């Protein structure tokens, strides 16, 4: 998930909706660089997961990031989300999967 969203959706901008979400939250002026930066950080998250270094901290970090990101998107950009408000349910399932 992190690699695909980071590389293809954000860094390569194959899914422009991601930059639109960032623009809605941070403003259009910074959306391009912010989207690329988020994409690179997501790629680094994928590398961290595969490395299995500090896996507990990695899991906690993923949960915090997903909960925070989805809460902000739920409030500020639900119309731009793939599944609208249902994205919150998808995020919750992902978080629960990380916990169990």
Image (cartoon, grey):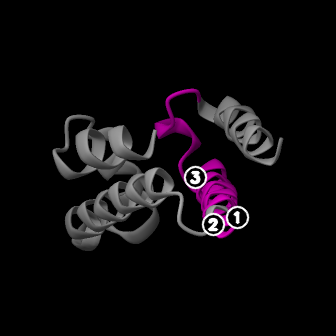
The x and y percentages for residue 2 are 43, 46
Classify mark 3: residues with Cα within 10 Å, few (<14), some (14-19) or many (20+). Answer: many
- Horizontally, is 98 left or right of 48 in the view? right
Marks 2 and 3 sit apart, C-alpha to C-alpha, by: 18 Å
Q: Residue at x 64, y 35 (%)?
A: 87
- Horizontally, is 20 left or right of 16 in the view? right
Question: Which quadrant of the structure image shows residue 98?
Answer: top right
Please give the range of residues in magenta. Answer: 56-83
Q: Residue at x 28, y 64 (%)?
A: 31
Single out the residue that lies furthest toward the front. 52
Q: Residue at x 29, y 41 (%)?
A: 9
The x and y percentages for residue 65 are 60, 62
The label shown at residue 56 is 1
Q: Is 86 part of what is drawn in magenta?
A: no
Q: Is residue 12 above or below residue 67?
A: above
Marks 2 and 1 sit apart, C-alpha to C-alpha, by: 9 Å
Marks 1 and 3 sit apart, C-alpha to C-alpha, by: 26 Å
Q: Is 70 part of what is drawn in magenta?
A: yes
Q: Which element carries disc 2, helix, strand or loop?
A: helix
The residue pinned by badge 3 equals 73
Quarter of the image for the C terminus: give it.
top right
Mark found first going from the N terminus, 2 or 3 = 2
Disc 1 to disc 3: CB gap under 8 Å: no
Disc 2 to disc 1: CB gap under 8 Å: no
The residue pinned by badge 2 equals 61
Residue in front for this viewpoint, 88 or 8: 8
Mark found first going from the N terminus, 1 or 3 = 1
Report the mark closest to the observer, 2 or 3: 2
Report the mark closest to the observer, 2 or 1: 1
The x and y percentages for residue 68 are 65, 63
């Amino acid at each position: 998930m992190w690699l695909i969203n980071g590389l293809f959706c954000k860094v390569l901008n194959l899914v422009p909706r991601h930059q639109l979400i960032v623009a809605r939250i941070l403003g259009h002026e910074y959306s391009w660089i912010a989207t690329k930066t988020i994409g690179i950080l997501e790629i680094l998250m994928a590398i961290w997961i595969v490395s299995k270094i500090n896996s507990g901290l990695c899991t906690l970090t993923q949960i915090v990031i997903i909960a925070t990101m989805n809460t902000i998107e739920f409030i500020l950009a639900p119309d731009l989300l793939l599944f609208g408000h249902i994205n919150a349910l998808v995020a919750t399932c992902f978080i629960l999967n990380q916990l169990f």
